[in-house]
Amino acid sequence: MATGRTHRPATRSRGIPEATVARLPLYLRALTALSERSVPTVSSEELAAAAGVNSAKLRKDFSYLGSYGTRGVGYDVEYLVYQISRELGLTQDWPVVIVGIGNLGAALANYGGFASRGFRVAALIDADPAMAGKPVAGIAVQHTDELESIISDNGVSIGVIATPAGAAQQVCERLVAAGVTSILNFAPTVLSVPDGVDVRKVDLSIELQILAFHEQRKAGEEAAQDAAQAGATAPAPARASRVLPDAAATPATAATGAATAPVASADARDNQGPDGDVPAVMPA
């Protein structure tokens, strides 16, 4: 069984920070849209807004590429597309294998954005013998028994895992042993890999949970604002007046006020309701 290529250490391009690397695809997407509209130049403010970052951060990121733009003119769109594509390694063809051709794997195989961004789906691999030979996105699915030879024959260095969680680690280990050094993991599990192997995890359920957190927080803030507004517009409660002795009371009663009425304890007086009644449920 072919073992593929030997491991090579993951490289870091010219000391560019990881945070900057993560933003380069955002810039490239915005620049590609401008290029398709035949826009020749773009200011840092315009490009930053299109990429969803602030302009100071954009200028700092581009300084790592050696691109500073021209004052009063901005950045040359086509040149920036080339610079960023070169930095991301997109000026060459990257063969990719997708392992796990269920609903998600099939959707990834049918995604048309791979080819336009420098990635070629070299093979689709699945453990189900019934899937072998079936065409998905115009590519015949191959069985996992052929994984190592496929990687070796196609010079694959990037693998996509779209298997169930229980199979992901074993698939990962086979990919790494065959020479894959970069893995995009869609399986809902954390993969253990040796040094020199890069893993990017895409977990849709986690992203949805994060969005649910923000939705819950926004709902709580809106409820608090509504309560505050309702409190501001509600009329102030009337102050309770002292109970004076009844005019028809006996002189002794009038002299002593309501002394003959049962006297509530201080705690009970403190917790009386608006009508002078002690609430049925006392505070703890």
Image (tube, grey):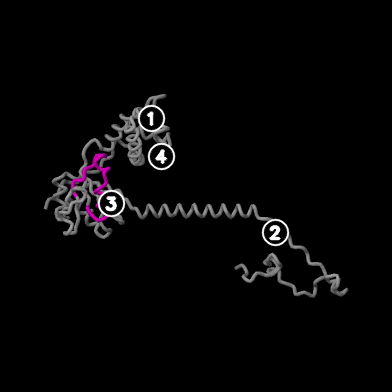
112 or 236, nearer to the observer: 112
134 or 252, nearer to the observer: 134
Q: Earlier in the sequence, mark 4 or mark 2?
A: 4
Q: Residues at badges 1 and 3 in contact (C-beta under 8 Å)? A: no
Which secondary structure, mark 4? loop
Amino acid marked by disc 1: Val
The residue segment tinted magenta is 99-123
Q: Calculate the distance from the C-alpha at mark 1 to the C-alpha at mark 3.
A: 35 Å
Q: Residues at badges 4 and 3 in contact (C-beta under 8 Å)? A: no
Above or below, 95 relative to 146 = above
Q: Position of residue 21 (x, y in %)?
A: 33, 39
All told, the count of numbered labels is 4
Which quadrant would residue 246 be assigned to in this image?
bottom right
Residue bearing the label numbered 1: 42
Amino acid marked by disc 2: Pro
Q: Position of residue 211 (x, y in %)?
A: 42, 52
Q: Earlier in the sequence, mark 4 or mark 1?
A: 1
Residue bearing the label numbered 2: 237
Q: Residues at badges 2 and 3 in contact (C-beta under 8 Å)? A: no
Residue bearing the label numbered 4: 52
Q: Calculate the distance from the C-alpha at mark 4 to the C-alpha at mark 2.
A: 50 Å
145 or 123, nearer to the observer: 123
Q: Is residue 240 left or right of residue 181?
A: right
Q: Calculate the distance from the C-alpha at mark 1 to the C-alpha at mark 2.
A: 61 Å
Q: Earlier in the sequence, mark 2 or mark 3?
A: 3
